[in-house]
Image (cartoon, rainbow, N blue to C red):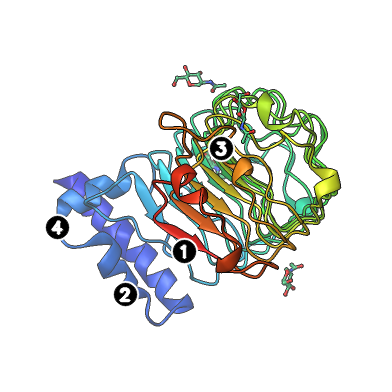
């Protein structure tokens, strides 16, 4: 009983001092603490919830500090696993800020103003259980040092990252999803080569002039649209046996930059080549289901691009073919296309 009274008093003191800072504090405190002493207990296991955040009693391992004008990372009680800090004005994080929160599994820091030079070298060093780190929509010019190797999902899209270091992703053997789109990357070098679990890589909307070399062969989804890529090596897709989805739209691809069998890669389900400068329909695998070629300069509907030989047993699995915005019309589709594209439900010309 004495402990409870003590806790209540401590809570009041805290409330009083917080109240001076924020006239609406009591409202937030009611929301975050609820009533009753189950709440108090959850609050005090491993440290109190900071006044500027919400720690719902029903979910004591989560702390919500998003969208409240914060400029700094608040104190994080050690019990917290899910930390929401998005939508604030945090520009820097000092070393030690997460040293007591070693159980963190999710750390949401997107939509802040993070500046690489103001993030301590060891900020993330103790987060050995961290699974998701969202750093997207910040002001990062590079990848912060010493990111946890335990990460499975890392988002750093919509920053101004112009390069990655060879060691940036070292040892992240569980990283599955990496979002680096909407940055200023010219190349990624061999930095991603060692990512032995990577299945989704989004590098769209950067300044790549070539398809990145040295990507892991585990990729299933590769998004490199909206770059300045003029060529794809003939053996490129062959390096990724599990690749299913490839987006290369809004690049500078020409027929010359695409050797004849480049896109005839079995396993591919969706291929987006729209908004390029192709004049011919490239040869594709008969397993492909979605092919987007709109807004190129295609002058001919070549059935041979889909079917090596047309017969009863061999036909294209293509369901959707988009060819709008090219230099052909419906009258250019030859009669034998029907036999080859026999399962297609949408053909747009
Ligand atoms: C971590 O915990 C120690 C001991 O309780 C405390 O002195 C320190 O201020 C805490 N650090 C942070 C960043 O919260
Ligand atoms: C971050 O970038 C935004 C948008 O470009 C800009 O308005 C803001 O001033 C930048 N913040 C810092 C701390 O540099
Ligand atoms: C990857 O995940 C496995 C299984 O959860 C775990 O044992 C291993 O330590 C993780 N690897 C890293 C580098 O954290
Ligand atoms: C694609 O490659 C396969 C196997 O290498 C071949 O049999 C097929 O005819 C090729 N498809 C096209 C459209 O060239």
Label 1 environment density (alpha carbons within 10 Å; few <14, some 14–19, many ≥20)? many
Mark positioned earlier in the residue sequence (3 or 2): 2
Give the x, y percent position of residue 212: 78, 38
- Mark closer to the chain start, 4 or 2: 2
In-front residue for pair 186/31: 186
Going from the N terminus, do you reach mark 3 or mark 1 first?
A: 1
Give the number of the mark in front: 3 or 2.
3
Residue nearer the viewer, 331 or 46: 331
Q: Which residue is mark 1?
A: 66
Looking at the picture, does residue 26 appear above or below residue 129? below
Pointer 4 with pointer 2, Cβ within 8 A: no
Tell me if mark 2 has few (under 14), some (14-19) or many (20+) residues whose alpha carbon lies within 10 angstroms of its own. some
Q: Secondary structure at mark 4?
A: loop
Residue 32, picture quadrant: bottom left
Q: Which of 13/145 is in front?
A: 145
Q: Earlier in the sequence, mark 1 or mark 4?
A: 4
**Mark 4 vs mark 2, CA separation in Å:** 16 Å
Question: Which residue corresponds to mark 4?
Answer: 36
Q: Marks 3/2: CA distance?
A: 70 Å
Above or below residue 50? Residue 189 is above
**Residue sitting at x 59%, y 62%:** 323
Residue under numbered circle 3: 307
Is label 3 or label 4 in front? Answer: 3
- Find residue 71 and report its horizontal and vertical position in percent: 61, 65
Q: Which mark is residue 26?
A: 2
Q: Confirm whether residue 260 shows in the render.
A: yes
Q: Any atom of ligand 4 within 8 Å of the CB at mark 3? A: yes
Q: Position of residue 203 (x, y in %)?
A: 69, 48
Q: Secondary structure at mark 3?
A: loop
Disc nearer the start of the sequence (1/2): 2
**Residue at the image point whose x is 46% and y is 31% from the top:** 314
């Amino acid at each position: 009983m004495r402990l409870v009274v003590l806790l209540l008093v401590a809570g009041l003191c805290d409330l009083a001092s917080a109240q001076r800072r924020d006239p609406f504090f009591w409202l937030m405190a009611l929301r975050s603490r609820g009533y009753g002493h189950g709440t108090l207990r959850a609050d005090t296991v491993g440290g109190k919830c900071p006044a500027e955040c919400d720690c719902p009693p029903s979910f004591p391992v989560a702390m919500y500090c998003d969208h409240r004008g914060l400029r700094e990372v608040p104190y994080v009680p050690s019990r917290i696993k899910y930390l929401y800090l998005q939508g604030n004005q945090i520009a820097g994080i000092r070393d030690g800020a997460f040293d007591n929160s070693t159980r963190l599994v999710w750390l949401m820091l997107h939509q802040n103003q993070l500046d690489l030079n103001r993030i301590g070298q060891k900020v993330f060093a103790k987060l050995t259980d961290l699974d998701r780190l969202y750093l997207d929509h910040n002001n990062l010019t590079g990848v912060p040092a010493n990111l946890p190797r335990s990460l499975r999902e890392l988002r750093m899209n919509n920053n101004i990252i112009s390069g990655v270091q060879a060691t940036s992703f070292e040892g992240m053997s569980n990283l599955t999803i990496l979002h680096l789109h909407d940055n200023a990357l010219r190349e990624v070098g061999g930095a991603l080569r060692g990512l032995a679990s990577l299945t989704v890589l989004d590098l769209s909307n950067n300044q790549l002039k070539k398809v990145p070399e040295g990507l892991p062969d585990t990729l299933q989804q590769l998004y490199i649209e909206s770059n300045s890529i003029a060529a794809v090596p003939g053996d490129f897709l062959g390096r990724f046996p599990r690749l299913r989805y490839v987006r290369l739209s809004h690049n500078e691809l020409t027929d010359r930059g695409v050797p004849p069998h480049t896109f005839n890669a079995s396993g591919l389900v969706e291929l987006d080549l729209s908004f390029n400068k192709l004049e011919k329909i490239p040869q594709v695998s008969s397993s492909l289901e979605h092919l987007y070629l709109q807004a190129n300069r295609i002058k001919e509907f070549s059935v041979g691009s889909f079917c090596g030989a047309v017969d009863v047993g061999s036909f294209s699995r293509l369901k959707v073919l988009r060819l709008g915005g090219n230099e052909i019309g419906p009258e250019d589709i030859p009669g034998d296309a029907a036999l080859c594209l026999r399962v297609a439900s949408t053909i747009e010309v």
